[in-house]
Image (spheres, rainbow, N blue to C red):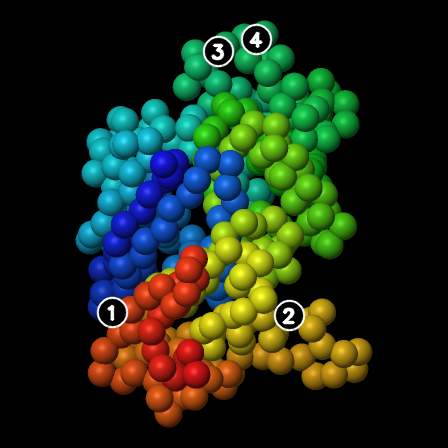
Amino acid sequence: MPLLDVKNLTTRFHTRNGVVHAVEDVSFSVEPGQTLGIVGESGSGKSVTCYSLLGLIPQPPGRIHAGTALFDGIDLLSCGERQLRQIRGKRISMIFQDPMTSLNPFMRIQEQLTEPLTLHEGLRGKKAVDRAVAALAEVGIPDPEKRILSYPHEFSGGMRQRVMIAMALITRPELLICDEPTTALDVTVQKQVLDLIRERQRELGTAVIFITHDLEVVSQVCDQVNVMYAGRIVESAPKSLLFRKPLHAYTRSLLQSIPARHRKGEELYTIPGLPPDMSDPPKGCAFHPRNRMGKPELCLTERSPELAEVEPQHWAQNCPGCLG
């Protein structure tokens, strides 16, 4: 039975310039201990999908129009704010993209690490501090007894990200959502952070949703991959199957743009054009204007393609031009 089962999630933003269709009819599930990757360009709906699950969409202008998200039998999209607060930060935690904007610059690390323990487990004083120090030590912060009294600006970018990981895991969550946690880090620190997340996942048995635009990262950490474009899932498959046999033109374009796939001195492939303006979503295939890996002349123009199981465990939008 899935730990998290999302069905037909639809989230839109009602702005002065119109309705932005950020996430449309998205469905997926996450098993205990599994790592699900959600990949796509900026603006594809990856982060909004997960923010919707945790009630982090600003309302207004955001509004969840449809869908269910069952977490251990509780619908995250319809439960009350009080019940959601009991789950968020305790049973489901999140590592945000930029730790400098996620950590409070006016509070010491100690206060920020002990807060979830006080809120969710009632721990205070020395017991909470000891747990916080242990959490810092587990993520590789040297001399944690002293560093816990520091402010965020006294840490490097990689160390701040480690603090965020410690904060997310300190309550032993069942599901961890990582929102591009390695984007601002150099390659060496990025590998350290990825190894740390996987190590803690193995120790705790935590399920992980990994949001990223980097398919190299996906290849290292994920079991299942959902590829998103223009607010929809365009392809979904186990990692090995997706990399071996990508079906959708957008997935093939993303794979082609990986630098490691080019010979030295060869011009890097880039996907032409820009993603569509989702305040005026296209009627047919959203990827049609940028499709160079399929047969754009066959793309649907009157209706949006639907996600269909093309082969066992392999789903893709049924647009003839993108599958061609």
Label 4, on which residue? Answer: 127
The residue lying at 69 percent from left, 73 percent from top is 261
Percent x, y of residue 129: 59, 14
Q: Is residue 274 left or right of residue 253?
A: left
* Cβ atoms under marks 3 and 4 closer than 8 Å: yes
Q: CA distance from mark 1 to mark 2?
A: 35 Å
Residue 15, placed above or below residue 104: below
Query: Which mark, by number, is residue 17?
Result: 1
* Cβ atoms under marks 3 and 2 closer than 8 Å: no
- Amino acid beneath label 2: Ile
Label 2, on which residue? Answer: 258
Q: CA distance from mark 1 to mark 4?
A: 51 Å
Instruction: State which tag comes first along the sequence, 3 or 2.
Output: 3
Tell me the mark number nearer the camera, choosing from 2 and 4. Answer: 2
The residue lying at 71 percent from left, 69 percent from top is 260
Determine whether the residue tagged by mark 1 lies in a helix, strand or loop: loop
Label 3, on which residue? Answer: 123
- Disc 1 crowd rating (10 Å Cα; few below 14, some 14-19, many 20+) is few
- Amino acid beneath label 1: Asn
- Amino acid beneath label 3: Leu
Q: Visible in this render: residue 104?
A: no
Q: CA distance from mark 3 to mark 2?
A: 46 Å
- Amino acid beneath label 4: Lys
Q: Quadrant of the C terminus?
A: bottom left
